[in-house]
Image (spheres, coloured by chain):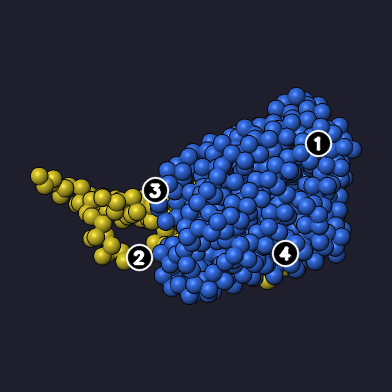
Amino acid sequence: MSNLALFPVVIPLIFAAILMLFPKKLHMQRIVAIAGVVATLASALVLFSKVNSDGVQAVTLGSWPAPFGISMVSDMFSVLLVLSSTIVTLFVLFYSIPTIGVKREQSFYYPAVLFLMTGVNGAFTTGDIFNLFVFIEVLLMASYALIVHGGEKPQLRESIKYLLVNIISSALFVSAVAYLYSVTGTLNMADLAVKIPQIEAVGILTVIAVLFLVVFGFKAAIFPLYFWLPGSYFAPPMAILALFGALLTKVGVYAIMRTYTLFFTMNTGFTHELLAIIAILTILAGCVGALAYFDVKKIIIYNIIIAVGVILFGISQMNAAGVEGSIFYLIHDMLIKAALFLLVGILTVIFGTSDLRKMGGLIKSYPFFGWTFLVAAFGLAGIPPLSGFPGKLLIVQGGFEGTHFWGSLVILATSLLVLLSVVRIFIYAFWGEPVKIVTIDRKHYLSMFVPTAILVALTVFLGAGAELFMPFISDAGEVLLNPSLYIDAVLKE
Amino acid sequence: MRTNDVMLQTATKVVTFIILMFAVHIFFAGHYTPGGGFVGGLLTASAIVLLMLAFDIPTIKKILPINYVVLTAVGLLIAIATASASIFFDVPFFTHAYDYFDLPLFGETSLHSALLFDIGVYLVVVGVTMTIIQTIGEDE
């Protein structure tokens, strides 16, 4: 089946179109949306086993020969990300049913989520740099719809900033693609990987590589381009925030990882050095934010930025340990960020506020919730055997093996700050004197808590069963470190 | 003060049909020459917008009782279905099929599956454009 790589992209698109036909039928909306995500998950699993047994899957659309048509490429790295993003979306959907509100559900919430999924999975799968732009636009369109969805005042205010930043970065993206095309004469990523080493004008290619770093940096929220993120992500409701936090910035991170390992490798002394420095600055900037705020949402939002820095530092090392660590940490981060946002969402529902100083003493009334939160917090900070640990360990090892031992030291030190920032939530919200809480009935609470708890359990499984997942992660890392595997799969058909 | 729009309305009644015919022409020209579903859709939408300007939105809604969101969804489904047909023949996605047929009146004509895809694009463009314009236009 040559089209298998496309299934996780096309299935949500079909279901989104179907959902647009009957926006007001609440039950049908929920059922069809969940059926769509489950079908996508099934196709992603089939694709995963196919990639695992037969290697990189590539299909060039419209039966055109490879460098001329648009290639869709599914290697282990991309299929792992498609799988994680689909899992995250599924749980967020379960969480949205009790929390998002009937009014939103009846105004195209579910189609927007599925369109977002189309864009995210497409961006992870495409093997063409212009097509990457198109899929990023698809997911941005859906995210514009989601960020203003409901039309509350802060949402409207923040969505203007969000739109402006993304339109500017999209304009830059198109110009960067045009520069790249004028220098190399191709936009197929595999073909780029063949042609770029043959071009002697390294200077201009380095400029283009940095321009792409700026473009993807806007999406990934690296230092100093993250300024739009804390405000914009703060506005929408928690389920949407969880989707954004878990998926959107990761697309930018993925794009940097892909381009900086596959073809922008002509001047690693400059570009990857720059990437390492920016990654460390991103971590530091994120830490300042994560410790500065008393708002639970803000704390987790700044932790997104820290994680972006950690992942990019690993990839900048360009050695097996660093790259594998980045891949593992990226997958871990998608799951744990979604879980943490959902947990924090339940917190804000219970206390009726997101201000830490107005919380306290919850461990008596919700003990199991408290311990789940603690597990997730430890997982985020990377305490063994939880899922943050193997990734971070490998990234730190990559730094020591490479030339940036100081970066590894920063990552180790900031891990403590990350731990402090989330444990602070635990201490404020669960310890101390109990404060007045909103009474929510058991059924409503469980409908929010169960999907969240399963997601946390998944991250624990990812960490404790790291030995089980490592072969896949190494497979993914191998394709990133040996671009020839990727090139052969696309061009030799 | 009531503005007198007899001239606009009279002209519109004629011009709309010219635009619509031109949209159809552009739509079918699209395979080998410039044109296609996207431009055809925009032209059609512009004809409807002209009607809305000359008359008013309630009147147009009465003569064209179309839910443009549903129109968009249907267009999207047609486009995806056409592209997905390639899955059943196990050829890469978006691969198109064509053949030559002897049709009455037209003589030998080449028929393409890409046309079906273009119909989908046409409906999506009309649907999205009209949804946007109606949403802005209805906002008092």
**Quarter of the image with the N terminus of chain B in it:** top left
CA gap, disc 2 and disc 3: 32 Å
Chain ID at mark 4 = A
Element under disc 1: helix
Element under disc 2: loop
Number of residues whose C-alpha sits closer than 10 Å to that of mark 2, classed few (under 14), some (14–19) or many (20 or more): few
Q: In the image, what residue type sits under mark 2?
A: Ile
Q: Residue at x 50, y 64 (%)?
A: A99
Q: Is residue A492 shown to the viewer in this render?
A: no
Q: Nearer the viewer, mark 4 or mark 2?
A: 4
Q: Is residue A460 shown to the viewer in this render?
A: yes
- The residue that label 1 is drawn on is A409
Q: Residue at x 79, y 34 (%)?
A: A407
CA gap, disc 4 and disc 1: 29 Å
Position in image of residue A353 (x %, y %): 48, 54
CA gap, disc 3 and disc 1: 43 Å
A358 or A353: nearer the eye? A358
Chain ID at mark 2 = B
- The residue that label 4 is drawn on is A458
Q: Which chain is blue?
A: A
Position in image of residue A291 (x %, y %): 62, 41
Q: In the image, what residue type sits under mark 1?
A: Leu
Colour in which chain B is shown? yellow
A120 or A173: nearer the eye? A120
Q: In which quarter of the image is residue B24?
A: bottom left
Q: Residue at x 78, y 27 (%)?
A: A270
